[in-house]
Amino acid sequence: MSVDEGSCTTNEMMTVAASRELKDGIMCFVGIGLPSEAANLARATHAPNCVLVYESGTIGAKPKVLPHSIGDGVLAEHADSVVPIPEVFAYWLQTGRIDVGFLGAAQLDRYANINTTVIGPYESPKVRLPGAGGAPEIAASAKEVMVVMPQTPRSFVEELAFRTSVGYLDGGNSREELGYLGGGPRVVITDHGILRPDPETKELTLTKVHPGTSVEQVREATGWDLRVADDLGTTNPPTEEELQILRDLRERTEAANKEMRVLDDLAQKSRAAKR
Amino acid sequence: MADVVSLREAVAELVRDGDSVALEGFTHLIPFAAAHEVIRQEKRDLTLIRMTPDLIYDQLIGMGCAQKLIFSWGGNPGVGSLHRFRDAIENGWPHELEIAEHSHAGMTSRYVAGASNLPFAVLRGYVGTDLPEVTSTIAPIVCPFTGEKLMAVPALNLDVAIIHAQQADRRGNVALWGITGIQKEAVLSARRSIVTVEEVVDEFEPHPHQIVLPWVAVDAIAVVPGGAHPSYAHGYYPRDNAFYEAWDPISRDRETFHEWMKRHVLGTGDFGEYLESILQEEVSSSR
């Protein structure tokens, strides 16, 4: 059963749409934030056997609440294995064992290249962003990549200030010439719709809009002249079940964070140790 | 080797101005107590190395300890920006900060090469990105056997590695478990090492995914319960997510930041006093 249009937020629509793109049983290398939320929603709905890998070294993580950081204890507790960080990048990622790399980004261009480094010139940046993290090698070596991020003219840009991670480089077969093992971005999910690369040019093409969103709105949220598929479709709205599970997950996470009173315990321990 | 000493002595003896220093721990077991001691002792001109600078380097950078930063992801995890890190790079406050940035895979490869005493490591990455243009420690290389084009990164050879672990035993062996990150490689790529621990035990019990650093790899051990706060110690205490959230407004403003550091870090003698100090503030602000 579907919910009526308008009864969920665009952010919820984005997360649900992203979660649906994950198939059951695959190995997914998960970035923190939006990708992590969508991946855990997938695990709680249609993909219970999805193996979530976080760059902290947790393989087969099964968090009951959403992790605040990429290395929370909740990721290690029920994981199939926890490996040292060099292993996660060398043995698991760069060997091509990962089916899907799931990333977020600050900026993206029409070939799904990603910037998470700076806004403005590198030597004197207007905004210094966190930087590369695990993304360049995820983008290089995962069999395919999914990107989830809100779509605005400032995030979907004509030209990146910095290319941190490679999507399809300059389009066509330019990515293939780099010699990467991975196939590149398969889909970009936003709060406006879903974009997929053109099979030939590799330029991102709007293939679906979310319910209640017009093509005009998506164009306005894009910093380049956006290509739209001839057979443009509309995303199915979240089902009641999907929405319920997502909201429960968020509430559970918030409640768990509120409950924690770490400092008291620590100060007591420290006092006891001094005695 | 592996003497149990006070943290103050360990830092005074083993960390010197101008050193290259890595305080490692990937989200888990971040050695905050040791960083505070480095700040209290006003160490200067350090080359700070760390995959994820986190709050720990935000504090060191803002307090003027760093001359250079080598890193791969500089954010406040789950919250947003590291404001002191950004202020240093964007505005040169409190002074210019030289940076060399990598990806996580690049940083881990550099540590592994350092721990192996090899000059460099190779990886499949960086090609097509802008990183090789801005980071001089990334260079292309061709495999002599297959002709495959790869990227090379030089070894990290540290002066000092500092980590926090759950336990040491009486002999000075160190046990850590849960997410063990890059700590083993950091210690083995360093000339000197300091380990803070939650406690010293007579004998280790087995834990899943545990690693043990033998005493020969460790120079000094200091017992600092809670020494990873606001990061966590698996089996001892959880990550203080509320503190990570609270750090955002504290660190956003130069003066607020400096006042906070003065009151809670410079104004306290050790990590126990620091914990009492921030606990008191938390209690009085919640009234």
Image (tube, coloured by chain):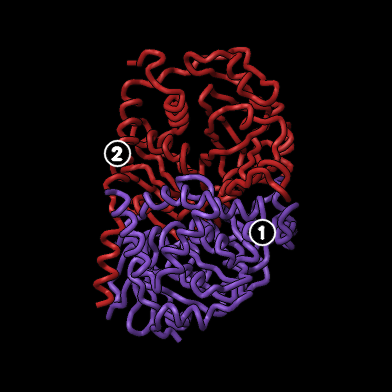
Taking the spot 59% from the left edge, 65% from the top edge, the residue there is B64
Chain holding disc 1: B
The relative height of residue B235 versus residue B241 in the rendered view (above or below) is below
Residue B116 visible, this angle: no
Query: Which residue is disc 2 drawn over?
Result: A252
How many neighbours does mark 2 have within 10 angstroms: few (below 14), some (14-19), or many (20 or more)? some
Q: Which residue is denoted by mark 1 in the rendering?
A: B99
Where residue A39 sits: x, y (%)?
Answer: 42, 37
Badge 2 and badge 1 in a common chain? no
Give the Cα distance between marks 2 and 1: 39 Å
Q: Is residue A167 above or below residue B281?
A: above
Q: Quadrant of residue A81?
A: bottom left
Question: Which residue is more in the foreground, A58 or A273?
Answer: A273
In percent of width and height, residue B149 lies at: 73, 54
Quick one: label 1, few (<14), some, or many (20+) residues within 10 Å? some
Q: What chain is colored purple?
A: B
The N terminus of chain B appears in which quarter of the rendering?
bottom left
Element at label 1: strand
Q: Position of residue B23 (x, y in %)?
A: 51, 67
The answer to whether any part of residue A204 appears in the image is yes
Residue A102, compared with residue B7, is above or below; it is above
